[in-house]
Image (cartoon, rainbow, N blue to C red):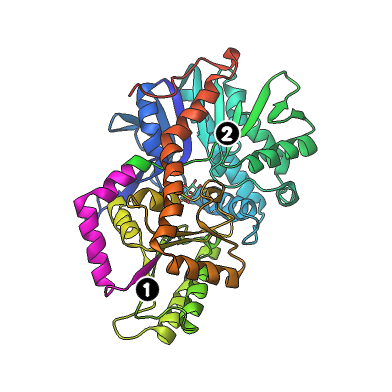
Amino acid sequence: MQADLVIVANRLPVDRVELADGTRTWRRSPGGLVTALEPVLRANDGVWIGWPGGTEQDLAPLEDDGMRLLPMSMTPEEIEGHYEGFSNATIWPLYHDLVAKPAFHREWWDSYRDVNRRFAEKAAEVAAEGGTVWIQDYQLQLVPEMLRELRPDLRIGFYLHIPFPPAELFQQLPWRRQILEGLLGADLVGFQLPGAAQNFIRLVRQRVGHKTHRDLVYLPDGRTVKAAAFPISIDAAGFEELARSESVNARAKEIREALGNPRKIFLGVDRLDYTKGIYARLRAFSELMRDDHIDVDDAVFVQVAVPSRERVEQYRVLRDEIDRLVGRINGDLGRIGRPAVSYLHSSYPREEMAALYRAADVMVVTPYRDGMNLVCKEYVACRYENDGALVLSEFAGAADELRQAWLVNPYDLNGMKSALLEAYQADHREQTRRMKAMRKTVATNDIDAWASSFLTEMANVPAEHGKQVRPLTEA
Ligand code: G6P
């Protein structure tokens, strides 16, 4: 199997799941990335290399709707060392401004390196002569360099979906130099925001000693590496279409009724992650109720927390903390049939999410640090009547684009309370003014624009680094 375009990501766009009767099957995991890359993969006869979850070994390649998928297996030790350990208990907290304390363990690093090597070897095996390989995210930062060693004929791109920290934090990492050199194997390194690209360039200059100028790194072997921002987005038209459908609107009405037809619904939707600021947000809301700014008969806060990385210690602790807080808030403030917070620890299909967005009057997205945050963009895409209010953390990448949201510092509880109250009380005109501007931004900068801008930039990589890939399918 040879492919002109190879996507390498820690996860495949399908999960391996076990049914009630014990048989195993594939389930499409919903996500923006696959929506964007599917047409490009098809147009270029591409393949996607990734892990489908679980520990099953030797899974055969499969085809999903014309997309070729190559499953990588992981052993229980690799899941512990590479995935739960180095990726999610070292890099994840370190790159998110130390919201939690990162743990540094040499065995985790070894496992991370080994898994990265296997992914690089697989990419080297399937990429056609002169092809393009696009590596995704923090779990695979060593793949670019490893792959270049094996296949110098390829064009190699890397995209980091999470923040890239300032030098002052990054330099804590015992393997800082290896990570920087790993990334420098790429021709193009993409980040969510310009500040992250600048952090990277500065670190390369200081720690690796290469010459840099603006967004370029000059390597001793004559190759140049470009670091630039490509803010990711969503399938805005797809979400709007869903939001306009009769079934979604009927479901939105049902949700409202099930909640007792409150005057206003606040909504939070996050993976259950300590970077997301769920605890502080619920506290801010509950204080507004306690102090009689909001009446429990008038409003409810619906918090959807999607289970995530449940075997990692800090995620377990967080789950217990949120469970306790929700229990306390409802115990103190709720009345029969009227909880202050309706808490759902579960994941839902896109249709149900669209219905929740249609039902929500105030969307609350308050991470301490977030690479982009797509939930706020999904909310905006679903508000086709130009109403609804978005409260958004300054520290989400999306705040750079969604300037018309009620922007908050999630560490400032009083500031957050004022913003929640303002958004709650905003009149229709004010909501419309803000939402219209945000909807224009999200409709223009959608996921197709993101993928094609990265691939167009890749096509500019000098010819000796491989042949060109067609950035987009002809519509
Ligand atoms: C974030 C990361 C992705 C990751 C996703 C889900 O969005 O940027 O790389 O796949 O979270 O996390 P999981 O650990 O379940 O893959």
Does 31 sit above or below residue 283? Answer: above
- Where residue 322 sits: x, y (%)? 47, 72
Q: Secondary structure at mark 2?
A: helix
Task: Pick whichever, 297 or 70, lies toward us.
Answer: 297
Q: Residue 314, relative to residue 43: is it above or below?
A: below
Label 1 sits on a secondary structure element that is strand
Whether residue 317 is visible, yes or no, is no
Q: How far across and how far down the image is residue 184, in percent?
A: 66, 31
Give yes or no for residue 327 being in the magenta stretch.
no
Q: Which residue lies at the image location 40% right of the left edge and 54% below the top edge?
A: 432
- The residue lying toward the viewer, choosing from 369 and 439, is 439
Taking the magenta stretch, the answer to whether it contains residue 246 is: yes
Going 53% across and 66% down the picture, which residue do you hit? 419
Q: Which residues are magenta?
A: 238-266
Mark 1: few/some/many CA within 10 Å (<14, 14-19, 20+): many
Q: Quadrant of residue 336?
A: bottom left
Magenta stretch prevailing secondary structure = helix
Picture coordinates of residue 241, whole percent (x, y): 28, 44
Judge left or right: residue 107 versus residue 172: left
Disc on res. 143:
2
What amino acid does circle 1 point to? Answer: Val
Mark 2, residues whose alpha carbon is within 10 Å: few (<14), some, or many (≥20)?
many
Instruction: Say if 178 sits above or below 284 in the image.
Output: above
Residue sitting at 44 percent across and 59 percent down? Answer: 430
Left or right? Give the position of 83 relative to 427: right
Q: Which residue is mark 1?
A: 300
Query: Does any portion of residue 67 appear in the rendered image?
Result: yes
Image quarter where the N terminus lies is top left
Circle 2: residue type: Val
Q: First in sequence: mark 1 or mark 2?
A: 2
